Image (cartoon, helix red, strand yellow):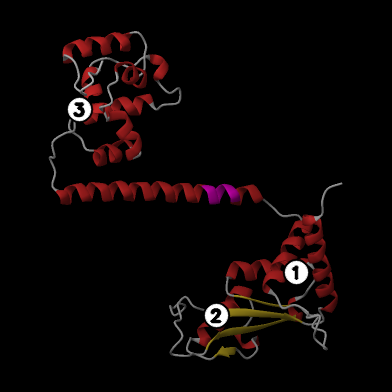
Amino acid sequence: MAHSDGKYPDFEVLREQAAALRRAGLSRRQIRDRLHVDNNDILNRLLEGEPPPEWTRRPNAKDDLRARARELRLEGWTYDQIQVELGCSKSSISLWVRDLPKPERKRSREEAVAIARRGWEAKLQIRDEERQQTKEAATQAVGNLTERELFLAGVVLHWAEGAKDKAYSHQRRERLQFINSDPNVISLHLRWLESQGVERERMRFRVSIHESADVAAAEAFWAGHVAVEAASFQRATLKKHSPATNRMNTTESYRGCLVIYVTKSADLYRRMEGAWYGIVGGATRQPD
């Protein structure tokens, strides 16, 4: 036990006591409290060579990785090197090898930084693969849509991105007009219109784009996407460009937005609006 002046008794005597307690099945914490040894370095020396009892091992611990990490640490590997080799977190490695002596530095700082960078790049690659797997699984889980599911999806999409009738307006605006810059969103909206019996002859197309962009190229792109002649497009809506505006969409991939207007669409608009409020009510209504 510790003396009143804070000094420990003969080290070998204390080591024998610690070893006996370890072999009796006590944990590090129990031995520390029993012998009043609060210094982890001294406790590590007292228990050196004494394996922990089985009951202290976590049932879900990665024993193989832990054993390999300890082997590599004894060979002089750093945390960064072990992380790259085993793909474990530094926190886990630290817990597994904290009782082992710290190896002498064998690499320069630049080499250590390079190893750490490779480890981080490997981790980013793993994260990206997991991200892609999650997306792919979600895509496969959707499967084919029923006509009802397609109708509801199109209603929600139009209410979010399409023009809406205004209750305060003196003139009714019950007509379908949709605008978006995402080709996938445009494709879904067109499929929805077709499912509701809207012929292509009733659709009018127009590009909305910054005046400083390539209008002709944008019209050619959208015409190809919706499978119509670019010459059939209505006159483009040009957005005034201000030099003070910090525009991010200045690359060659910028094609503005496509506006789709449907003639004689008041009835479909009303059904769309009614279905939207039905969706809201169905989602928020408390079950009986």
Q: Amino acid at mark 2?
A: Gly
Lower position in the chain sequence, tag 2 or tag 3: 3
Q: Is residue 136 magenta?
A: yes
Total labels: the figure holds 3
Which label number is shown at residue 151? none
Q: Position of residue 176 (x, y in %)?
A: 75, 78
Q: Is residue 84 left or right of residue 227?
A: left
Lower position in the chain sequence, tag 3 or tag 1: 3
Residue 129 visible (yes or no): yes
Q: Main secondary structure of the magenta part?
A: helix
Q: Please, is residue 50 above or below residue 110 in the view? A: above
Q: Amino acid at mark 1?
A: Glu
- Mark toward the viewer: 2 or 1: 2
The crowd level at tag 3 (other Cα within 10 Å; few <14, some 14-19, many 20+) is some
**Residue under label 3:** 74
**Residue under label 1:** 194
Q: Which residues are magenta?
A: 134-138
Which label number is shown at residue 256? 2
Q: Position of residue 220 (x, y in %)?
A: 55, 81
